[in-house]
Amino acid sequence: MLKVARTLTDLHASRAARRDAVHKGYCRG
């Protein structure tokens, strides 16, 4: 159960980081 929650958290963090990176790219470009 804890492992699943950690995986979901990692996935969410990864998605947020990727979205933030894309947003920064748009702002820069």
Image (cartoon, rainbow, N blue to C red):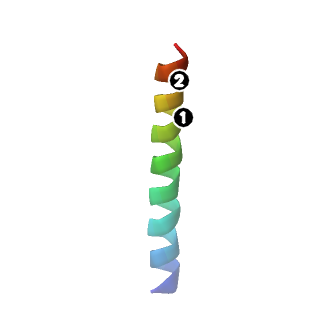
- Residue lying at 47% horizontally and 49% vertically, measured from the top left: 16
Name the residue at 44% across, 58% down: 12
Point out the residue furthest to the bottom here: 1
Disc 2, SS:
helix
Relative to 19, does residue 6 appear above or below in the rendering? below
Residue farthest toward the top in the current orientation of the protein: 29
Neighbours of disc 2 within 10 Å: few (<14), some (14-19), many (20+): few
Q: Residues within 10 Å of mark 1 (few under 14, many from 20)?
A: few
Contact flag, marks 1 and 2 (Cβ < 8 Å): yes
According to the picture, the residue beneath numbered tag 1 turns out to be 21
Q: Which mark is residue 13?
A: none
Please name the amino acid that badge 1 sits on. Ala
Which residue shows up at 52% across the image and 13% down it? Answer: 29
Q: Quadrant of the N terminus?
A: bottom left
Residue 7 at x, y percent in the picture = 50, 68
Quarter-of-image position of residue 28:
top right
Residue receiving disc 2:
25
Q: Is residue 18 above or below residue 5?
A: above
Q: Whole-percent x and y of residue 22?
A: 48, 30
Depth order, front residue of 21/8: 21
Q: What is the secondary structure assignment of the residue under circle 1?
A: helix
Q: Residue at x 46, y 31 (%)?
A: 23
